[in-house]
């Protein structure tokens, strides 16, 4: 039985819980989804999602509750996906980030709240059908280091990338009925 954690300090927690449960059901995976708030809850996980929300707030809460070191240890053991603010936290060189992926990130790259938008993206790893993406005060990946594969771009800017079993997504897959990104993430679990 697998256990997938959603970091539940702030952000789109319930939406990711629903999406992962739906994806697990579709993939016939038995397990549970845990809303992670403590270090002890991190120990038994097979995968972790750091949701969208407000990256500065999340970073402060991760530090306040002493989750930094535990999450960093997990990065060598389990898949971790960061969406929007979670992408910012995964990057290196960003103030208060976890520094897990060799990516440089620009916050609010498309503008503020009123510049949020939806668009169809081509993500070859998910198949030929376009993926309808929702960008809300979204970051972009400005630079990628060795071992980082860009999985999707918008307007020439990297908006989804992978380094080993770490996945960074600039948009909000939890806000769409399309489960392909959550299923892709679950496919990274050790067999």
Image (spheres, rainbow, N blue to C red):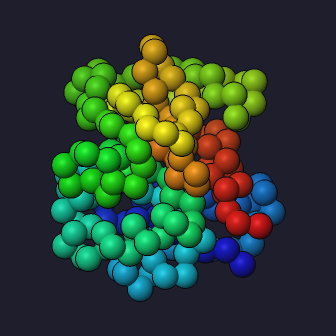
Question: Which is nearer the eye, 84 or 78?
Answer: 78
Identify the image quadrant of the C terminus. bottom right
Please, is residue 94 above or below residue 40 in the view?
above
* Number of numbered discs on residues: 0
Question: Which is nearer the eye, 103 or 186?
Answer: 103
> Residue drawn 38% across and 30% down?
143
User: Looking at the picture, how far across and down is residue 101, in whole percent?
Assistant: 42, 49
> Residue drawn 18% across and 62% down?
60
> Residue drawn 24% across and 76% down?
65
User: Looking at the picture, how far across and down is residue 178, in whole percent?
Assistant: 64, 39
Q: Quadrant of residue 30?
A: bottom right
Question: Which is nearer the eye, 76 or 137?
Answer: 76
Farthest-out residue, front = 146
Farthest-out residue, right = 28
> Residue drawn 63% across and 61% down?
21
User: Looking at the picture, how far across and down is residue 10, in whole percent?
Assistant: 30, 59
Please, is residue 91 above or below residue 57 in the view?
above
Q: Say whether residue 95 is left or right of residue 125.
A: left
Q: Say whether residue 189 is left or right of residue 61.
A: right
Farthest-out residue, bottom = 40
- Observer able to see residue 123: yes
Please, is residue 39 above or below residue 167 in the view?
below
Q: Say whether residue 86 is left or right of residue 120.
A: left
Identify the image quadrant of the N terminus. bottom right
- Observer able to see residue 36: no
User: Looking at the picture, how far across and down is residue 90, in whole percent?
Assistant: 38, 51
Please, is residue 14 above or below residue 3 in the view?
above
Farthest-out residue, top = 155
Q: Say whether residue 128 is left or right of residue 142.
A: right
């Amino acid at each position: 039985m697998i256990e997938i954690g959603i970091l539940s300090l702030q952000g789109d927690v319930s939406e990711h819980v629903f999406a992962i449960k739906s994806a697990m059901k579709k993939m016939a995976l038995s397990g549970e989804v845990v809303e992670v708030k403590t270090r002890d809850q991190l120990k038994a996980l097979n995968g972790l999602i750091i949701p969208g929300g407000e990256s500065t707030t999340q970073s402060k809460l991760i530090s306040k509750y002493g989750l930094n070191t535990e999450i960093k240890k997990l990065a060598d053991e389990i898949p971790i996906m960061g969406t929007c603010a979670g992408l910012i936290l995964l990057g290196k060189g960003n103030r208060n980030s976890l520094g897990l992926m060799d990516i440089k990130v620009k916050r609010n790259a498309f503008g503020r709240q009123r510049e949020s938008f939806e668009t169809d993206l081509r993500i070859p790893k998910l198949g030929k059908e376009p993926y309808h993406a929702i960008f809300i005060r979204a970051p972009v990946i400005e630079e990628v280091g060795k071992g980082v594969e860009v999985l999707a771009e918008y307007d020439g800017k990297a908006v989804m990338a992978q380094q080993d079993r770490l996945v960074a997504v600039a948009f909000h897959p939890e806000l769409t009925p399309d489960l392909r990104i959550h299923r892709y993430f679950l496919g990274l679990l050790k067999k």
